[in-house]
Image (cartoon, rainbow, N blue to C red):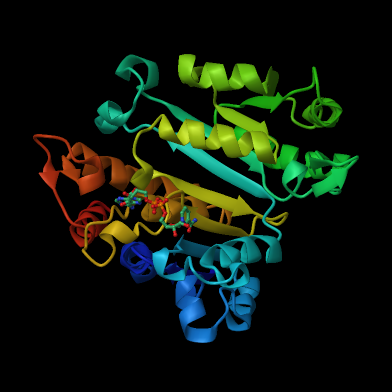
Amino acid sequence: MKICYLPGDGIGPEIMAQALRVLDVFQSEGMKIEREEALLGGAAVDATGEPYPPATQQLARAADAVLLAAVGGPKWDVLPRPQRPERGLLGIRKDLNLFANLRPAVLYDELKNASSLKPEVVSGLDILIVRELTGDIYFGEPRGITVENGKRVGRNTMIYDEDEIRRIGRVAFEAARKRSKKLCSVDKMNVLETTQLWRDVMIEISAEYPDVELSHMLVDNAAMQLVRAPKQFDVIVTGNIFGDILSDQASMLTGSIGMLPSASLDENNKGMYEPCHGSAPDIAGKNLANPLAMILSVAMMMRYSFADETTATRIETAVKKVLAAGLRTGDIFEEGMQRVSCTEMGDAVIARL
Ligand code: NAD
């Protein structure tokens, strides 16, 4: 396994260090892992003047998988846009053609009080949102603000071709196959022709996956159902803009951003794996960050890029055991639990592994 890892900024290096310790365990057991560090985001701007420098491009392209912690911080927010850390993030996603974004929203039973919903509504929640990441109204042309007949007009274009829909659809059906074989495709086919095509193509490819039960839901209803009865979903597949909104909504059902990993994949299951949270500059350098989203990103990497379900489950089980033992970093702390640092949380996961 050739892994390129990018610690990035803020709490990034602290949480990445814990993820690397997890890889150390597997390496000591004989797993063949080659890993190389590279710069992305603010750290890259400081060292080279660019947020996604050529040396990082080379390593990321040559790797089988990329592990990213987080980028960004107030220090770089004053720079011209092309030099901002976020450009590095968009740059690497585009460069590696990572069109499929997988975001699980899992509520660990031990953390059910962290959700804003009633425990009985969310307890046992485990859903996966598959979002198309490189098309839709975010990239469609024409776009822009123009003046027409003396008035300003804003314009964006919602567009998908059938190949784009088919490739994200296949990722979602494959993911559903590895879970409970239920896939819900979210669209707005009653109003938007682009999403009528989306639904038509989803139905066409469902013939290739007779073992997966496909259903459809309009996006407004999906938003409502996600807070009314989220456990009715297993895997959801949707376009870029709907997925942007629904995946944030779903992740917040779990109430703890420090727990949520994500994967962004290309057509060959090469992927970039990263926590859903940012670089948390407010707690950077204090050994306070929750490293679990980063460690769970390693589990996703094992599952999706290396098809190693056993190792993925082993990491996830270790994390569950640590939570069951009452260990909590500050972001998920509750009265009666044991407050631990970032490195102590890492120690605890390693011990369970
Ligand atoms: P954030 O996710 O970094 O932080 C939001 C809040 O959650 C903060 O209070 C932070 O302390 C807390 N938090 C986040 N992750 C945590 C963890 N692992 N453990 C404990 N607490 C945690 O979001 P923000 O403050 O809006 O953004 C900070 C910087 O991160 C900005 O520069 C932003 O652009 C960047 N950002 C990067 C990514 C990414 O790299 N993918 C994503 C979002 C934001």
325 sits left or right of 197 in the view = left
Residue 193 falls in which quadrant of the image? Answer: top right
Q: Residue furthest left?
A: 336
Q: Position of residue 88 (x, y in %)?
A: 58, 67
Q: x%, y% of residue 321? A: 24, 42
**If the image is split into quadrants, where does the C terminus sit?**
bottom left
For the N terminus, which image quadrant? Answer: bottom right
Viewer-closest of 285 and 93: 285
Residue 181's spot in the image, x, y percent? 61, 27
Q: Which residue is found at the position 81% from the left and 40% from the top? A: 153
Q: How many marks?
A: 0
Quarter holding residue 111: top left
Q: Judge from the rendering whether residue 184 lies leftward or rightward of residue 302; answer left or right.
A: right
Above or below: residue 57 compared with residue 271: below
Residue at (11, 34) in percent of width and height? 335
Which image quarter: residue 288?
bottom left
Percent position of residue 185, x then y: 69, 26
User: Is 74 positioned to the left or the right of 141 in the image?
Assistant: left
286 up-or-down from 35: above or below: above
Q: Is residue 287 above or below residue 144?
A: below
Single out the residue that lies furthest toward the front.
150
Q: Can the viewer see residue 44?
A: yes
Rendered residue at 29%/47% (across/down): 318
